[in-house]
């Protein structure tokens, strides 16, 4: 574990990366026994591991320099030993005790016909009403639920109790997007159906996207050079995931799906361990603690263990924004904040 708390890992594909403690399920890169520390995977580098004097930390070096793993996700070699180049020993069993957990819900095997959207306002803001009306019109026979701030609060308390509600309330109200992230995972895990950001929509009936055996729908950005979302979802912290982040402005899933249980547990752990120096503030803190980074890494870790299907969101008719540049519509967009994410 680095001095900043991230874990140096090796994936099943043999790729070196690092993760937050709640994601440290793959093979650890280094192991420790009575003989000392040794590398658990094949490497062409001749590694030297040395305990620092008067410190409970180790350095890992080679002819290239000191191995480093910083918060932003990059791993490499540096000529000097500073904070990011120091590691300490931690066992997987100790990591397990650090994780936040809540009770599992019985998994369903059908995505029910309910559309969920949320906003803080008591009523749907005028700028989004056309989008909502189109969704309802295109999905005759579906149930539509608009969750305002009070309904979100009551839902979390009714279904998950005070212990989980405390985590939700600990999110700074300035970060409405993070509270919306928190709610969408709990809502779909409990009720199932289709969650869409209020700015997001669909050009076709949702029933035309779903198959009878669907349990979870995933999609990724068209983020290659020259594509419609060039550069989206390619943060260094999720660079191990082919094609980048899994979109969570839409969540389409059966109630009780294990993907969402894992996302919620990891999100709760990050909230409980939040610090400005580690997770940051503003947009990056939201991405890391409640948003696409924790969502993507949580699912990627167990991707092949549970039923799911990838779709092309554009070809299927899903729309990321029906209001153009949505950052101009939301007057106090979270990307402009500098205050701590967690109170």
Image (cartoon, rainbow, N blue to C red):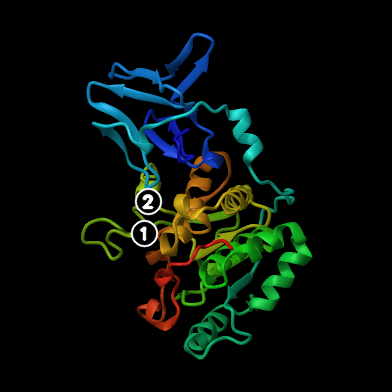
Q: Is residue 285 shown to the viewer in this render?
A: yes
Q: Residue at x 51, y 91 (%)?
A: 126
Q: Which residue is mark 1?
A: 221
Q: Quadrant of residue 166?
A: bottom right
In the rendered view, does 98 fall on the left or right side of 88?
right
Q: Residue at x 27, y 32 (%)?
A: 80
Q: Is residue 49 above or below residue 234?
A: above
Q: Quadrant of residue 284?
A: bottom left
Q: Secondary structure at mark 1?
A: loop
Q: Quarter of the image for the C terminus: give it.
A: bottom right
Rendering coords of residue 276 (x, y %)? 48, 55
Q: Nearer the viewer, residue 293 or 322?
A: 293
Q: Is residue 145 shown to the viewer in this render?
A: no
In the rendered view, does 151 fall on the left or right side of 300?
right
Q: In 3D space, how far apart are the residues under numbered discs 2 and 1 (Cα atoms)?
A: 8 Å
Q: Residue at x 36, y 59 (%)?
A: 221
Q: Earlier in the sequence, mark 2 or mark 1?
A: 1
Furthest-bottom residue in view? Answer: 126
In the rendered view, does 112 fall on the left or right side of 231?
right
Rendering coords of residue 222 (x, y %)? 32, 59
Q: Are marks 2 and 1 in contact (CB under 8 Å)?
A: yes
Q: Which residue is mark 2?
A: 244
Rendering coords of residue 311 (x, y %)? 44, 57
Rendering coords of residue 241 (x, y %)? 40, 44
């Amino acid at each position: 574990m680095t001095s900043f708390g991230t874990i140096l890992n090796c994936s099943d594909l043999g790729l070196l990366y690092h993760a937050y403690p709640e994601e440290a399920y793959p093979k650890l890169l280094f192991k420790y026994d009575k003989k000392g520390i040794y590398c658990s995977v094949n490497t062409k580098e001749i590694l030297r591991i040395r305990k620092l004097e008067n410190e409970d930390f180790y350095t890992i070096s080679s002819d290239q320099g000191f191995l480093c793993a910083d918060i932003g996700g990059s791993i490499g070699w540096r000529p000097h030993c500073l904070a990011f180049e120091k590691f300490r020993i931690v066992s997987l069993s100790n990591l397990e005790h650090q994780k936040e957990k809540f009770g599992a819900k019985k998994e369903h095997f059908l995505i029910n016909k309910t559309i969920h959207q949320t906003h803080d306002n008591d009523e749907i803001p005028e700028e989004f009403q056309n989008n909502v009306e189109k969704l309802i019109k295109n999905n005759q026979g579906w149930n539509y639920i608009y969750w305002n701030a009070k309904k979100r609060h009551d839902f979390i308390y009714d279904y998950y109790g005070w212990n989980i509600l405390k985590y939700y309330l600990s999110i700074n109200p300035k970060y409405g997007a993070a509270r919306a992230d928190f709610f969408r995972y709990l809502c779909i895990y409990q009720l199932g159906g289709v969650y869409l950001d209020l700015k997001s929509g669909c050009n076709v009936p949702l029933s035309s996207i779903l198959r009878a055996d669907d349990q979870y729908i995933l999609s990724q950005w068209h983020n290659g050079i020259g594509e419609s979302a060039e550069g989206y979802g390619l943060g260094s912290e999720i660079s191990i995931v082919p094609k980048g982040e899994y979109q969570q402005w839409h969540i389409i899933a059966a109630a009780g799906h294990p993907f969402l249980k894992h996302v919620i547990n990891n999100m709760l752990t990050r909230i409980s361990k939040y610090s400005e120096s580690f997770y940051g503030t503003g947009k990056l803190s939201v991405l890391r603690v409640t948003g696409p980074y924790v969502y993507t890494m949580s699912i990627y870790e167990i991707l092949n263990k549970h039923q799911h299907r990838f779709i092309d969101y554009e070809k299927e008719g899903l729309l990321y924004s029906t209001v153009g540049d949505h950052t101009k519509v939301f007057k106090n967009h979270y990307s402009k904040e500098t205050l701590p994410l967690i109170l």
